[in-house]
Image (cartoon, grey):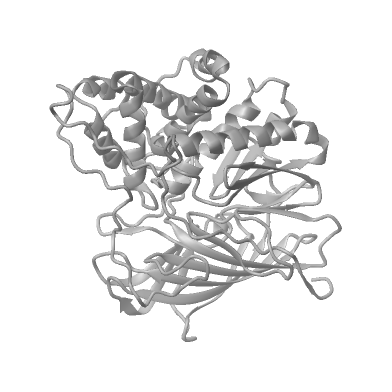
Amino acid sequence: MKGSLVGLTLALTIAACGLRLPPAADGGPTEIPQPPSPSATSSASSAEPVPTAPTPLIPTAETLPVVEGCGPRPQTHYSLNVTFDFDTHRLQVNQRIFYFNAAPEALESLVLVVDANRREGVFSLGEVRLADGRPLDGSDLQGGRLDLPLLEPVPPGEGIELTLSYGLEIPPRRGPLGYTPLQTNLGDWYPFVAPYSPEERWIVHEPGQVGEYLVEESADFSVHIELVDPPQGLTIAASAPEAGTDGAEFLLCDARSFAWSASTEYERLRATAGDTLVTAYVFQHDAPAGPSALSAAAAAVDAFSGLFAAYPHSSLAVVEADFYDGMEYDGLVFIGSEYFQDDRTSPANYLTTLTAHEVAHQWWYGLAGNDPAAEPWLDEALATYSELLFYERARPELTDWWWDFRVARFEPQGWVDSRIYEQAAFRPYVDAVYLRGALFLHEVRGAMGDEAFFAFLRDYLAHAAFRLATGADFFAAMDRWGGEELEGIRSRYFRSVP
């Protein structure tokens, strides 16, 4: 390491968020409309009350630790203190985890997902201890899984606090975790507690040939970064906005991930979408395309906040990526450089389309979580169809172009409910899950009508917010708003319906 530690001005603060619905046309609060009663339509299924906010899975405990700005909640808190040397691509991290046991049974062990350890030489684990200093001997790190036998079981409704130290040697590669001459990316860089259920136990998936496989629960993040002799002009893009003057805590509440990226090549452009600050971080040589990405992102936040629910954070970072395609994290999305270089004066291009897609994941991934390995359609099909909804709201004259450019020319085939492990190549995976998923949603919309269709999506989102939703949750919401005519549509796109 070079010289002394220098604090970077990177205090990132996001206020605690709850699920908010789009405002009514008169500016007053909007409630989720109730599903139609059986008498309202001959084909409607029996209705059940729909709450205006998701029902908590467990009661709030008075003794929960409080991350200032997030408030007490029965969920996990991550606190990460990072020393980062940009020139050598090394991190040293001290991490504290408070884990809340929401399971109906006592837990005698914890399992952490350590995705950075899947590549040799990237992750080096130091000590793992309880908060009182007692070591957790017997921990076993294999691939992307760290098993931690506990000294005492954690009863239901109670929590445990532990600390761990580790180093990261960021690999020279183009990707969400890697560095190139243009940027250093920190996506999926820290260990997190795997979701637990009595039926599946700890949910830890192995990578497939295509698709995403990390299953993340909502949590609160407090991150502090110290830079070692940072180069002139270094800019940090992160899941939360810069604030403060002394390298204070970065705070992100009710999120599934915290990602960041560092570069001396970024040019920043800013806009607002309602109360949301949208910032585009674009490489200087691609600066002419920056306004297009920024405009698309801000318009997408506006569109989806109106259609689904208010954007759940105070900021959004759109980061040009020196790797192919795109990737979503809470409060931050990566968009591949090839799309910036292909930008044209018209929004009829992949830069606009993929920006809308990745922004949509703030709702279909960030707000309503799911298992992307087992049911990738739950986020990818919805994010793809949201591209069309974006064009309908922002550039309706381009909707026919979108259908041809994005879907029809590929003549997609395959089952929408394919798992990532069933596809060995990107094209058939996208055709089945993304594109056929969009066709399925469009047929459902046509059968239900716009009013019921968008009420159904808001209903599903309200029940799924800050949870891990399943296909069963999706179809239960759909059944509350539709009728028997939807059965034939399902059978054409899904092998099985939960």
Closer to the camera in the image, 362 or 13: 13
Closer to the camera in the image, 359 or 52: 52
Q: Is residue 307 above or below residue 102?
A: above
Residue displayed at 57% across by 63% down: 251
Q: Number of labelled discs?
A: 0
Left or right: 286, with 112 as reference point: right
Q: Is residue 220 above or below residue 438?
A: below
Q: Is residue 205 above or below residue 420?
A: below
Percent across and percent down for residue 156 are 27, 71
Percent across and percent down for residue 401 are 56, 14
Residue displayed at 79% across by 31% down: 288
Residue displayed at 74% across by 49% down: 183
Q: Is residue 236 above or below residue 400?
A: below
Q: Is residue 439 visible?
A: yes
Q: Is residue 209 visible?
A: no
Percent across and percent down for residue 282 are 74, 41
Quadrant containing the N terminus in the rendered view:
bottom right
Left or right: 183, with 330 as reference point: right
Q: Residue most toward the front?
A: 26
Residue 478 lies in what quarter of the image?
Answer: top left
Closer to the camera in the image, 184 or 368: 368
Quadrant containing the C terminus in the rendered view:
top left
Percent across and percent down for residue 438 are 42, 25
Residue 453 lies in what quarter of the image?
Answer: top left
Q: Residue most toward the right?
A: 232
